[in-house]
Image (spheres, rainbow, N blue to C red):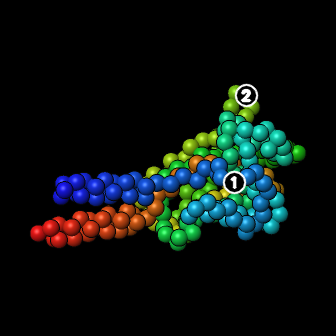
Amino acid sequence: MKKFVKLAVMAAIASACASASAGVVTFETFLPGIYTNGEQLVNDDQQITVRGQGGFDGALINGRDPSSCDLAVCPAGNSTNYYTALNDGGFSFSLLSGNTFGLSSIDFGFVLPIDMVLNFSVGKLMLMTNDGTTASRDFSLQNAGGDYTFTRWNFGNTFSQGAFSEVTFSACLYDGLGDCVNPAGNQAQFAVDNLAFVPEPGTVALVSLSLMGMLGARRRKSV
């Protein structure tokens, strides 16, 4: 019986660590729609807050429906739901629980304005955390078919082992003079999907300590 209890607790610890070790924002629970500055998309503990100028700042796209992205040219090759930040806008990610988290990776791509000539040689996705840590990654250029596509950005230890309460994503475009700028005439637009994050290490530690305490109490009781 003791062996069974020990194995059960250890299995619970492993399960808790696995469930607390990663999360992914996929946007599959949301319906396609248009969003403006300050609006939020919430799924369980995950919270996306739209950032922009208070107009047409973002949209949820159904990659299975070509007409879902008829006001721009969205990145090719994604047949799932994804979020687009439009007209020089962006978005912030946080957890409703207030817990901190690290970042693992994100899929992103450039969204080409359909009704205007692009005045920039594309640009990059920018990341800023609540503590001022920044990073950026260039958008992939057009492929042989003339399409922009999604690229995976793996953030590395600086971000995966971090403890952030909020992170904000935006874009800038290269102006031909060596600068990456935003505002960019409402042309700094991007799409994102599969934002992978890691809950704060303390979450895993507390769960493990609690279950180990249960195991210890069980042992003392049986003595």
Local crowd at mark 1 within 10 Å, few (<14), some, or many (≥20)? Answer: some
Quarter occupied by the N terminus: bottom left
In the image, residue 165 above or below residue 13: below
Identity, as a three-letter code, of the amino acid under mark 2: Gly
Instruction: Tell me the kind of residue under disc 1.
Output: Phe
**Front of the two marks 2 and 1:** 1
Q: Is 223 situated left or right of 33 in this image?
A: left
Q: Secondary structure at mark 2?
A: loop
Res 150 quadrant in image: top right
In this orientation, which residue lies closer to the viewer: 24 or 167? 24
Which residue corresponds to mark 1? 30
Task: Farthest residue to the top: give it.
Answer: 144
- Disc 2 crowd, CA 10 A, few/some/many (<14, 14-19, 20+): few
**Residue 164: x and y, percent?**
50, 67
Give coordinates of residue 25: x percent, y percent.
58, 53
Judging from the image, what secondary structure is the residue with disc 1 in? Answer: loop
Which residue shows up at 49% across the image and 69% down it?
A: 99
Q: Say if 182 sits above or below 177 in the image.
A: below
Q: Which residue, given by chain and number where applicable, does mark 2 sit on? A: 145
Along the line of sight, the residue nearer the viewer: 58 or 175: 58
CA separation in Å, label 2 and label 1? 30 Å
- The residue shown at (31%, 68%) is 210
Image position, residue 168 (x, y; %): 62, 63
Closer to the N terminus: mark 2 or mark 1? Answer: 1
62 lies left or right of 8: right
